[in-house]
Image (tube, rainbow, N blue to C red):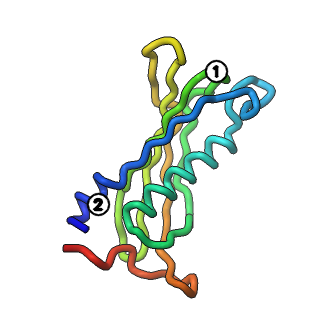
C-alpha cells in the first residue's frame, strides 16, 4: 500500500458542487448545515480512501465560516489527512468558492473532522495495519 505519506497524498479528495437556490437559506446563501454535511461527506471519503477500513465520524474541530456562499457560485471541497493516530485520523477540509464566470477563487470555510476505524463489532481497530 505504500508509506503513510504516500497514502496521505493518494487519499486527498476533491468534490465540486454548484450552489443552487434549493440549497440556500432566506439570505440566498448556502445553509451552514449543508456546508457541514458536505464537509463531513468529503472527509469520510478521504478517511476511507486513506485507511481502506470502515470509519465513523467521532468529532469535529472548529469550523470557520469566513464568508457566505451565495447561490450561483461553484464550490470545491478539498479533504486531506492532517494527522494519524493508532485507531483514528484527523481530516482537514477546506471549501473554496469560485465565481462561475470569472477566475475569482477564495477559501470560505475550513475545519477538521476526526474519524475512528471500527471492526465488525463496531469497536475501534487500528486505522492502518498493512504498511510496507
**Which one is nearer the viewer's eye here, 28 or 61?**
28
Which residue position holds label 2?
A: 7
How far is disc 2 from disc 1 in space, using C-alphas? 35 Å
Residue under the image location 44 percent in, 61 percent down: 47
Q: Secondary structure at mark 1?
A: loop
For label 2, the crowd category at 10 Å Cα-Cα, with few meaning under 14, some 14 to 19 and many 20 or more, is some
Residue under the image location 28 percent in, 52 percent down: 9
Q: Residue furthest right?
A: 26
Among the 4 quarters of the image, the one containing residue 60: bottom right
**Mark 2 touches mark 1? (CB < 8 Å):** no
Q: Position of residue 16 (x, y in %)?
A: 51, 36
Q: Quadrant of the C terminus?
A: bottom left
Q: Position of residue 66 (x, y in %)?
A: 54, 31
**Which one is nearer the viewer's eye here, 130 or 87?**
130
Q: Position of residue 122 (x, y in %)?
A: 57, 82
41 left or right, relative to 79: right
80 left or right, relative to 100: left
Q: Position of residue 101 (x, y in %)?
A: 52, 12
Which residue position holds label 1?
A: 72
Q: Quadrant of the N terminus?
A: bottom left
53 left or right, relative to 23: left
Amino acid at each position: 500500500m505504500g508509506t503513510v505519506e504516500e497514502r496521505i497524498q493518494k487519499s486527498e479528495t476533491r468534490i465540486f458542487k454548484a450552489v443552487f437556490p434549493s440549497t440556500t437559506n432566506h439570505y440566498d446563501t448556502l445553509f451552514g448545515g449543508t456546508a457541514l454535511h458536505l464537509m463531513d461527506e468529503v472527509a469520510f471519503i478521504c478517511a476511507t480512501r486513506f485507511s481502506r477500513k470502515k470509519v465513523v465520524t467521532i468529532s469535529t474541530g472548529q469550523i470557520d465560516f469566513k464568508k457566505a456562499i451565495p447561490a450561483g457560485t461553484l464550490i470545491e471541497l478539498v479533504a486531506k489527512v492532517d494527522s494519524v493516530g493508532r485507531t483514528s485520523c484527523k481530516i482537514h477540509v477546506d471549501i473554496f468558492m469560485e465565481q462561475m464566470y470569472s477566475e475569482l477563487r477564495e477559501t470560505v470555510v475550513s475545519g477538521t473532522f476526526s474519524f475512528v476505524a471500527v471492526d465488525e463489532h463496531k469497536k475501534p481497530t487500528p486505522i492502518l495495519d498493512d504498511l510496507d
